[in-house]
Structures are given as C-alpha cells and as structure tokens.
Image (spheres, rainbow, N blue to C red):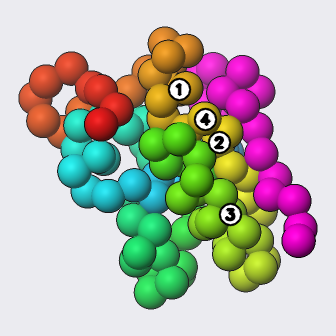
Amino acid sequence: MTAIPTVHVDGVPDPVPDDLVVLDVREPAEWEHGHIDGAVHIPLGELGARVGEVPDGQVLVVCRIGGRSAQAVAWLGQQGHDVVNLDGGMLDWQAAGRPMVSETGRPPQVV
C-alpha cells in the first residue's frame, strides 16, 4: 500500500497561496456551514464523475477529519494529480483559528 501524501494544518501556509488549490470533498450540508474561502467543492461520492473539474497544479484535499480526503487523495494520485491530504481536516483547521466562510448567514463552523 502506498503512503498517502499528508500535511498537518501547521504545514499549510497562512494565507493559502494562490497557486494551491483547496478541494473540499465533504457533503453539501457540511460545506454550507463552513469551508475554506476559494475552495473547490466536489463531494467524494461525485468525484469520479467530476474529476475533470479538479484543477491542475498542487491540490490540498480536505474533509471533516481526513478520512474521506485520504480516499480522494489516493484515487486522484492514481489519476496523475498532484494531491496532498489535510491531516485532521476541517476540525483541525477550525481549531487552529484558520479562516473559513459560511453559506448559511451564520458564523462558519465545522459540522
């Protein structure tokens, strides 16, 4: 089994550089409550059908705690994408006080 390329939130520059794409693979309700501004949203279950929407270049893949994003990273890596998993996911992102936005009109939160 090949190791999943992984980075902890401390290893992600703040602010996120323009040349680093963030791909959020959580479900729509999770996304709406809080996500990284500028992230691309493709739920894990739709990734196979929507892989053409994954931008070129280095991609940081996120989910709630890192499990779904690890699956996405493994698969996308096999497809030739330059991907890395965010260890600890959005929960660690939020705990580190990193910026998020919400689609609900309320303060962003990880659900």
Q: CA distance from mark 1 to mark 2?
A: 9 Å
Q: Eyeballing the image, is 55 above or below 15?
A: below
Q: Nearer the viewer, residue 97 or 3?
A: 3
Give, as a three-letter code, the residue at label 3.
Val
Residue at image location 30% in from the left, 27% down from the top = 109
- CB contact under 8 Å: marks 3 and 1: no
- Above or below: residue 3 compared with residue 1: above
The image's mark for residue 73 is: 3
Q: Which residue is mark 1?
A: 93
Circle 2: residue type: Leu
Outermost bottom residue: 49
The span from disc 3 to disc 1 (Cα, nearest Å) is: 18 Å
Residue type at numbered disc 1:
Trp
Disc 3 from disc 4: Cα separation = 14 Å
Residue at image coords 38%, 27%: 100
Pointers 4 and 1 in contact (C-beta within 8 Å) = yes
Q: Earlier in the sequence, mark 3 or mark 1?
A: 3
- The answer, for residue 32, to whether it is visible in the render is yes
> What residue is rendered at 73% in x and 52% in y?
84
Q: Is residue 90 left or right of residue 27?
A: right
Amino acid, disc 4: Gly
- N-terminal of the pair, mark 1 or mark 2, is 2
Q: Quadrant of residue 78?
A: bottom right
Name the residue that disc number 2 marks: 86
SS for tag 4?
Answer: loop
